Amino acid sequence: MIYLVTGGSGFIGSHLIGQLLRNGHSVINVDNFDDFYPYQIKIKNTLASIDTISDFEFSDKETDIRHLISLSRSDQYICYDQDIRDKKGLEDIFRNHSIDLVIHLAALAGVRPSIERPLEYQEVNIRGTMNLWELCKDFGIRKFICASSSSVYGNNEKTPFLETDNVDNPISPYAATKKCGEILGHVYHELYHIDMIQLRFFTVYGPRQRPDLAIHKFTKLISEGNEIPFYGDGNTARDYTYIDDIIDGIIKSISYLENNSKVYEILNLGENQVITLSEMVSTIEKHLGKSAMRKILPMQPGDVLKTNADITKAKTLIGYKPDTDFQNGIKKFVEWFLRK
């Protein structure tokens, strides 16, 4: 099978591509190496995903990305430096490859930055995604997996969160763009018969996690002896999901789509285990062997109080079965952090 993965040089995407290649498939990676965080991290992610050990010498972004693309290209894998907002550029990729299924992970991420840059989030997360659906329609690609987010639930008062819960009250532009993606995805399913699964990811963590996310950021600050920003009273809580479990959920979603037709489904991919901010910090402290210095700050606009996934539907439909508890997940993450 030939899979196109957008955002394939990011955290989740690079792990997914590695698994798809190990499973014997061919992969087209579409990533624009956005400056949301250092492009050098994405280059390292890409090399890790294709199991390439390289003493990569960095110079400037344009040269480095060209070098990466030439270094990594093979019969089984190709990487494109391509923005999903550029439909013409995407069209050339679709024309040059016989794509069986699209896994769309690319997005502008982050709740707080979306409040500062809402129009850019709309351009990437809505218009960019529609470009992909338009090309799937035009080139006859009828299988599509899309990354949604637990943020669509907002401050849902009922826990755990069910896919059938009302999600009409997002509290950030990022969450709103993800909800729009689910709605527009259903339009393309109905009008053009594109089989689709929308995956609501719940706070994914593990090796290669983005450096701006709390677990990675806190681990770095604590290891360096610096203060960590501690928002609220420590009782906010998240359903943290280890990267291996997320990849398992995506792979099983792919299998389900390939073996079924007339599909439009929304699935929660979480761990079904809620961890408070205080518990998260204490777990990092334990595995680092260092104490955190907390800088107490007020809650931030757009932050939800709690996330908690009901994963019954994913278990029933695709056989999703997360098996990495938070203690073991943080242990694995800290081990990776200390050797990277």
Image: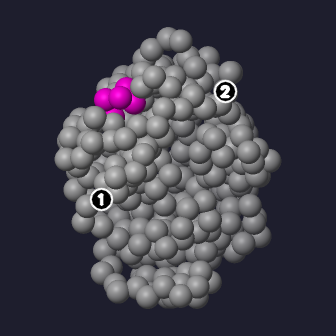
Instruction: Where is residue 74? Give x, y as percent.
Output: 42, 83
Q: Earlier in the sequence, mark 1 or mark 2?
A: 2
Vertical relation: 86 (above or below) 51 = above
Residue 25 in picture, x, y percent from top left: 37, 66
Name the residue located 42 percent from the left edge and 62 percent from the top edge.
14
Could you tell whether 109 is left or right of 210 in the image? right
Identity, as a three-letter code, of the amino acid under mark 1? Phe
Dominant SS type (magenta): helix
- Position of 115 relative to 233 (above/below): below
Classify mark 2: residues with Cα within 10 Å, few (<14), some (14-19) or many (20+): many
Q: Percent position (x, y) of residue 101?
A: 52, 56
Separation of residues labelled 1 and 2 (CA atoms): 33 Å
Q: Is residue 221 visible?
A: yes
Residue that numbered label 1 is attached to = 337
Judged from the image, the secondary structure of the residue bearing numbered disc 2 is: loop
Q: Residue at x 62, y 65 (%)?
A: 34
On screen, residue 86 above or below 155: below
The residue that label 2 is drawn on is 170
Q: Residue 205 lies in magenta, yes or no?
A: no
Residue 192 - label: none
Residue nearest the observer in this picture, 49 or 203: 203
Tag 1's secondary structure?
Answer: helix
